[in-house]
Amino acid sequence: MGTKILVVEDNELNLDMITRRLQRKGYETVVAKTGAEALTAADAERPDLILMDLSLPEMDGWEATRRLKAADGTKGIPVIALTAHAMAGDRQKALEAGADEYETKPVDIKRLVDKIQALLPGERQ
């Protein structure tokens, strides 16, 4: 089986665009639309990597990332934080919450895939 990526995104257009482009690159995708769904999906699916939107309804991506990184079963899964609000200090804040990498929206798919490959040794699509 290929590399499985959990895409956590509540915006349908962004979700569709990201998942389709990752699938075209050969990645298997799993989807969650809230922080709570992300925790459940990460535990059930054990993805190789998680793309985490930071602006989510109910539980935001910051809190979901903190919880994923605090849980034994999911703490080793790399997380790339995604945000449209690239404010000064956001990257540092995302890394402090436990994210392994940070990407701004609109997503540059080539740059994103480069970051995915950097976080998954031996991963070449």
Image (cartoon, rainbow, N blue to C red):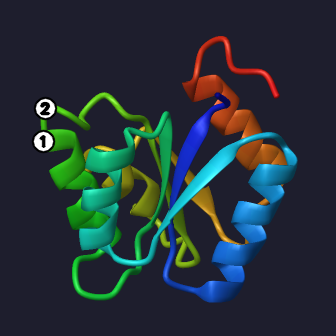
Q: Position of residue 27 (x, y in %)?
A: 71, 42
**Percent of width and height locating residue 8:** 47, 66
Q: Is residue 114 visible?
A: yes
Give the structural element (helix, strand or loop) at label 2. loop
Where is mark 2, residue-wise? 72
Based on the displayed image, in which of its 4 quarters is residue 65 positioned? Answer: bottom left
Seen from the viewer's position, the closer of residues 27 and 63 is 27
> Where residue 84 sits: x, y (%)?
58, 77
Q: In the figure, is residue 42 to the left or right of 12?
A: left
- Left/right placement of residue 57 relative to residue 87 reads left
- Frontmost residue, 45 versus 12: 45
Q: Residue at x 22, y 77 (%)?
A: 59
* Quarter residue 13 falls in: bottom right
Residue type beneath disc 2: Asp
Tag 1: amino acid: Ala
Residue 98 vertical placement versus 119 (above, below): below
Pick the front one: 81 or 12: 12
Furthest-top residue in view?
122
- Res 107 visible: no
Question: What residue is shown with label 1?
Answer: 70
Tags 1 and 2 touching, CB below 8 Å: no
Q: CA distance from mark 1 to mark 2?
A: 7 Å
